[in-house]
């Protein structure tokens, strides 16, 4: 996996509902779009934050069961991760697997 690839896909498992997991790898400096597919029967949630605090519909982006979303995250200079915040995922059920794809620009 590399920021030099035009896109990169991976899976993330939320082992315990209510305990957000950090996406690994994090979006690269040239990643401009994050696509997330949730092929499970549970809802998934995403948010830029520090720590494993629970993410839900009231404070995150909901990815409903059996659906997908696309997030335009913009250049690194305007992302919340300029501090300690990282992109994290949580879910409404234990063991939820979400599929993430980063779309990367060609300028570095």
Image (cartoon, grey):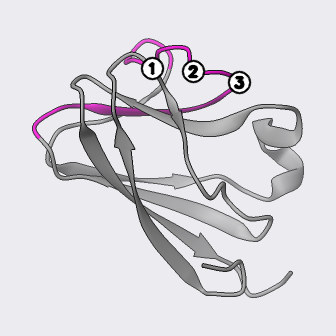
C-alpha distance separating marks 1 and 2? 5 Å
* Above or below, 61 relative to 106: above
Q: Position of residue 80 (x, y in %)?
A: 78, 36
> In the depicted view, which residue is nearer to us: 94 or 104?
94
Residue where numbered disc 1 is placed = 19
- Which of pointers 1 and 3 indicates the residue nearer the eye? 1
Q: What residue appears at the point 71 percent right and 24 percent down from the top-left corner? A: 50
Q: Report the magenta residues as a range.
A: 41-59
Q: What residue appears at the point 54 percent right and 80 percent down from the top-left corner? A: 7
Residue 95 image-quadrant placement: top left
Q: Position of residue 49 (x, y in %)?
A: 67, 26
Image-based side of 71 in relation to 67, left or right:
right
Residue where numbered disc 3 is placed = 50
Image-based side of 85 in relation to 10, left or right:
right
Residue where numbered disc 2 is placed = 52
Q: Position of residue 43 (x, y in %)?
A: 23, 31
Callout 1: SS: loop
Was residue 44 drawn as part of the magenta stretch in this picture?
A: yes
Q: Position of residue 94 (x, y in %)?
A: 24, 27
Q: What residue appears at the point 68 percent right and 67 percent down from the top-left corner? A: 31
Callout 3: SS: loop
Callout 2: SS: loop
């Amino acid at each position: 996996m590399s920021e030099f690839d035009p896109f990169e896909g991976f899976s993330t498992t939320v082992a315990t509902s209510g305990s957000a997991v950090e996406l690994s790898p994090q979006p690269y400096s040239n990643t401009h779009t994050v696509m997330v597919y949730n092929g499970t029967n549970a809802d998934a949630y995403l948010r830029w934050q520090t720590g494993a605090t629970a993410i839900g519909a009231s404070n995150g982006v909901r990815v409903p069961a059996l659906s997908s979303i696309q997030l335009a995250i913009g250049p690194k200079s305007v992302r919340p991760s300029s501090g300690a915040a990282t992109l994290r995922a949580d879910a409404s059920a234990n063991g939820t697997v979400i599929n993430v794809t980063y779309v990367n620009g060609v300028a570095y």
